[in-house]
Amino acid sequence: RNSPRIFSGIQPTGIIHLGNYLGAISQWKKRQDENENVILEIADLHSITLPQNPETLRQSILQMLATLLACGISPEKVLLFQQSMVSTHAELSWILGCVCTMPRLAHLPTFKEKSASLKDVPLGLYIYPILQAADILSYKATHVPVGEDQSQHIQLTQELAKMFNKRYGYCFPIPHAIVTDNVYARLKSLRDPAKKMSKSDPDPKSRISLLDKPEEVIIKIKKAVTDFTSEISYDPEHRPGVSNLLSIHSFMSSKSIDVICKEVQGLNTVSYKKLLADVIVAHLQPIQKEYYAFLSDEEYLHNILKHGAEEALAISTKTLDEVKEKLGL
Ligand code: ADP
Ligand code: NA
């Protein structure tokens, strides 16, 4: 009963990069493999806060599902579902919106950042942290793995849960953020190791995508910005470029950075990059094979989404019923 419930979500935004794979998916898989109670949402309602092409979105949802499966997320062990198929989230978000104030949302840095460049700001962009709170609270989640930029949203979720509990009687456990993508655990851009590896970076050479072909991996690693010292050493502060390559290497090989540094002693950056590219290609190839196999079986994918939605709806409806009862609805 008191075991942790872990909730996390990922927007269906096409193909992920190694940063997302390390910072998000591999962390979920680790918890799944440790038999933790993991709930994973493909957050399609969040992705429409900005306009999407419907056909692309439909495809992106299946691609994200195939990606998760190819990376080893198992629908047998994890509650995996598509957000818009579970209508209770939107309903709970309305109720939480009635507990939240407007200034509380206006001060969130993600909103300020995302709305700054827009002439007309959609209401959805403004209120999506409430939907995020509803996602989490629908499952009475206790732990939420997030990137650093999302920790303020978890704080809002905590406040809404506390306010609701105080006003209407205890209903929600207070969820804790687990910050997985902090400055230290973060993969950096291959073009500028002062920045993080990100899909919003306009230069595709700044990141390795999960579906990059071997020749793309080789060229991107070859061109990765390092420094004028040719030996391989780990020093994120003074040598961020080569240290980032070692972080990628450690992740792809499951070896510690110390062990890798000993193994590659004597190599210069050029030959080290060749070795690293081979390690990445060897890691990605089986994942890519699985990805394309899953993606070609739409019936199987839709089946997973159907079963996931049923299970998610059963849990979240129980919560929503309890909430409505307390409100007098
Ligand atoms: P992006 O910056 O590519 O748009 P998001 O901000 O959408 O990525 O993050 C999606 C998930 O991937 C989050 O859990 C985040 O913590 C993780 N993540 C994103 N970039 C990195 C990175 N460079 N290193 C580690 N984890 C990352
Ligand atoms: Na981002």
Image: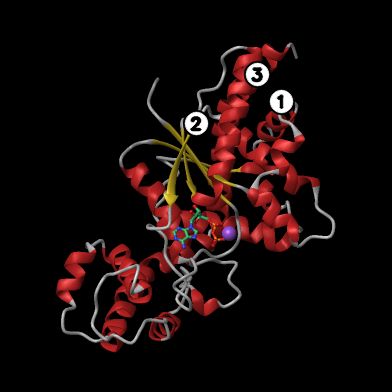
Residue at x-position 43% and y-position 65%:
18
What amino acid does circle 2 point to?
Pro
**Camera-nearest label, 2 or 3:** 2
Would you name the residue on which mark 2 appears? Answer: 175
Side of 213 relative to 137 (left or right)? left
Instruction: Pick whichever, 7 or 315, lies toward us.
Output: 7
Q: Position of residue 81 (x, y in %)?
A: 56, 42
Sequence-wise, the earlier of marks 2 and 3 is 2
Q: Residue furthest right?
A: 120
Would you name the residue on which mark 3 appears? Answer: 323
Q: Please, is residue 252 above or below residue 203 in the view?
A: above
Residue at x-position 74% and y-position 37%:
103
Q: Please, is residue 103 above or below residue 270 in the view?
A: above
Side of 113 relative to 234 (left or right)? right
Sequence-wise, the earlier of marks 1 and 2 is 1
Label 2: how many Cα within 10 Å (few below 14, some 14–19, many 20+): many
Sequence-wise, the earlier of marks 3 and 1 is 1
